[in-house]
Image (cartoon, helix red, strand yellow):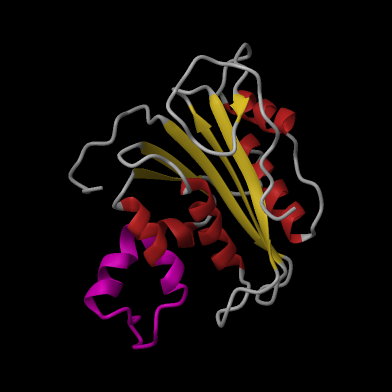
Amino acid sequence: MSASMAVPARPRFVAFTDGSALVNPGGPGGTGFVVLDREGSAIRFGGTRWVDDGPAGVTNNRMELRSVLDALHGIPAGAVVEVTSDSRYVIDALTRWIGGWRRKGWRTASGGPVMNRDLIESIAAREEEVRVRWAWVRGHVGHPVNEICDALASAAARAQAGPAAADVVAALRAQGALGVADEPRVVEAWEAPRAPGPGRGQMSLGF
């Protein structure tokens, strides 16, 4: 969406993302994400394991970028989402560097090709459809939902079971994103907001 369009103080969607490469570069790697729909009283979360990521290979930065794509997947056009990441690379790439890269034909200051252009452009394309507000959080300092995303990404990379819905809800409550009485549904895809109802199973991407 246009950068000139104001982003509401309280976005409908709140997303948290993290990525991990057990060997950087080389992998295997994993993504982790949690998305809360405040209007629909629903959450969507999961992770994906990557053992190969094309010519670029599996790297921590690519897993960080892919976790954002996972989180933005399916969010309705025109919706507003706040994306919180512990990767300065991701946030700076999408908010500070991308304009210069485009002007220079996707070349760095030294003249080399911009790494991870494919994923950066994919995220930028989603930003043409939804309004994204970026937020950074320092990793591994006890941020409850960031820690859950880290656990989801690490579990995906290791092909292990990750945190369950109860863990995600507890983290969102600890972070203040949910109230103690809130019982969000777990969904696999977003839909129009409705009254809270029975939960569905956890979405798992590649576990």
Side of 195 relative to 134 (left or right)? right
**In which quadrant of the rendered view does residue 92 lie?**
bottom left
Position of residue 11 measured from the top left corner of the image (x, y, whole percent) = 38, 31
**In which quadrant of the rendered view does residue 193 lie?**
top left
Residue 177 in view here: no
Residue at position x 72%, y 72% in the image: 23
Side of 127 relative to 152 (left or right)? left
Q: Nearer the viewer, residue 129 or 68?
A: 129
**In which quadrant of the rendered view does residue 174 lie?**
top right
Position of residue 77 measured from the top left corner of the image (x, y, whole percent) = 33, 42
Side of 46 relative to 105 (left or right)? right
Picture layout, residue 76 above or below residue 122:
above
Q: Nearer the viewer, residue 183 or 135?
A: 183
Position of residue 67 measured from the top left corner of the image (x, y, whole percent) = 56, 54
Residue at position x 67%, y 33% in the image: 168
Q: How many marks?
A: 0
Picture layout, residue 177 above or below residue 101:
above
Extreme residue toward the top, this view: 181
Residue at position x 35%, y 80% in the image: 108
Side of 159 relative to 59 (left or right)? right
Extreme residue toward the left, this view: 4
Q: Which residues are magenta?
A: 93-120
Q: Nearer the viewer, residue 98 or 165?
A: 165
Picture layout, residue 20 above or below residue 85:
below
Q: Assess whether residue 74 is covered by the magenta stretch.
A: no
Residue 114 in view here: yes
